[in-house]
Amino acid sequence: MTVVGIRSMAHYVPEQVLTSADIARMSGIPEEIIREKFGIHQIHKAPPEESVTDMGVKAAKKALGEMDPQEIDMVVYCGSEYKDYYLFNAAARIAHQVGASRAAVFEIHNLCSAGVWSLKVLKSMMIQDESLKKVLLVSSSKEGDLINYEDQDSRFMFNFGDGAAAVILERDYRRNVILESAMIADGRFSGDVSVPWIGSVNFNAFDKMPPKGHYLQVTDVQSMKERLDPVTLDNFLEVMRQAAKKSGFEKIDFLAPIFMKRSIVLHLMEELGIDEEKTYVLEEFGHCQSADSFISLIEGEKSGRLQDGDRAILVAAGTGYTWAATGIQWGEYRG
C-alpha cells in the first residue's frame, strides 16, 4: 500500500516577543486575564522588514537541512492570506528562494484549519500521482499586524503571533504516516471576521477607508459568541473522533492542537481519554494561524511528549467556520 509520511519538519519564529504584560498594557486588559482567560504567556513579533514569505523561507530551509532542493517536486503554501502583497503567489516566491526550481507550486487557503486539511489534500495527490515523491508544505503568518489592541471586540484575536512552519512529505516514506481526516463546516459564521475594507465588496469605497480599516474586525462579537459557544467544543470533539476512527485508532496518544488556552485543551483531552501530558500547548508561541499544529508536533517531539508509536491527532479550527482534524501514526508505520 502506498503511504505518505512526514520526512522532516521545522518552525521559525522571530526573536522579538510581546509578553502578556505588553499585551495587557496595549489593550488595557489586566495581565492576569491575558494569561489565565486568554491563555497567552507571550507571542512572537516580526519586524516590519521581515515578510510572511521571509519567515516561510527560513522554516523551509531548516526543514530541508542537507536535502537538495531540486528533489522537491512541489511547493505548497497553506498559510495566512495576509501575505507580502495583495494578490501574490507566496508559494512561487518560497520555491524560488529555497532553490526548488523544478517544483510545481500552488496554494491552499482555509484560514487557520488549512494546515491540518492540506495534509489530506496532499496525501491524496501524492498517492494518485507517483511523480510527486517529495512535497514541501509551508505555513506562515504575520497576522499580528492586523490586530488593533484598542478594539475590545477583537480581543479573542489578541493571541495572534508571527511565525512559520514547514513540512516535507515523502511518498512511500513509512514513518510519521498521514492517515485520515475529518472536517465540519458552518457557513453561518462566514461573515463574522474579516478585513472589511479590503476586497471586492468595498473596492469602490476604498478611498473612504477609515484610519484603522485595514485591521481584522468582528462584525458583531456578541452574536458570534452566542452562536459559536454552543457548538465549537462539540465540533472539535466530533472531528477528532471521526479522524481517529477513520485512521483506525482505538485510542489517541498525542494531541497537536491549534492555539487554545490550556484549560480547553485539557478538557478536550479528558473527553477523549488522552493523558494530559501528551500534548504541547502553544502558550509561548501564540496563534501562528495554520502553522499551530505543526509547531505543536515539533515541540512535542522535542520535549519527549510525542514518541514513536504514538497515534497523533492534529486539530484546528478556522473562522468561517471550519473544524478539522487529521490522524498521523508517529514513528515506524506497520500498517
Image (tube, rainbow, N blue to C red):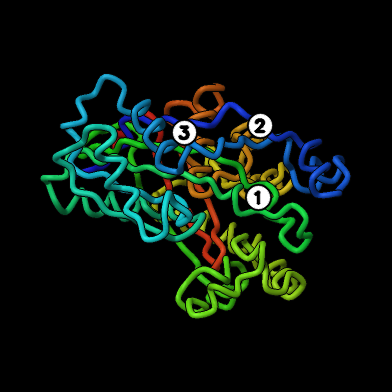
- Residue at the spot 56% in from the left edge and 64% down from the top edge: 319
Q: Is the residue 192 above or below the residue 258 in the image?
A: below
Type of amino acid at the residue the image marks with label 2 = Val
Type of amino acid at the residue the image marks with label 3 = Asp
- Residue 33's label in the rendered image is none
Q: Nearer the viewer, residue 320 or 19?
A: 19
Q: Where is residue 164 in the image (x, y as percent from the top left)?
A: 47, 38
- Residue at the spot 39% in from the left edge and 51% down from the top edge: 78
Work out whether mark 1 precedes mark 3 in sequence or the reverse, and give the earlier one: 1
Quadrant of image for the C terminus: top left
Type of amino acid at the residue the image marks with label 1 = Leu
- Residue at the spot 16% in from the left edge and 44% down from the top edge: 132
Residue under label 1: 268
Residue under label 3: 310
- Residue at the spot 59% in from the left edge and 49% down from the top edge: 145
Q: Position of residue 275 (x, y in %)?
A: 64, 36
Query: Which secondary structure lies at badge 1?
Result: helix
Residue sitting farthest toward the front: 207
Residue under label 2: 17
Whether the residues at callouts 3 and 2 have beta carbons within 8 Å, the answer is no
Residue sitting farthest toward the top: 66
- Between the residue at mark 2 and the residue at mark 1, the CA separation in whole angstroms equals 28 Å
- Between the residue at mark 3 and the residue at mark 2, the CA separation in whole angstroms equals 32 Å
**How busy is the neighbourhood of tag 3: few (under 14 within 10 Å), some, or many (20 plus)?**
many
Whether the residues at callouts 1 and 3 have beta carbons within 8 Å, the answer is no
Q: Which of 129 and 151 is in front in this view?
A: 151
Q: Is the residue 158 above or below the residue 294 in the image?
A: below
| Residue 72 shown left or right of residue 296 in the figure | left
Query: Which secondary structure lies at badge 3?
Result: loop
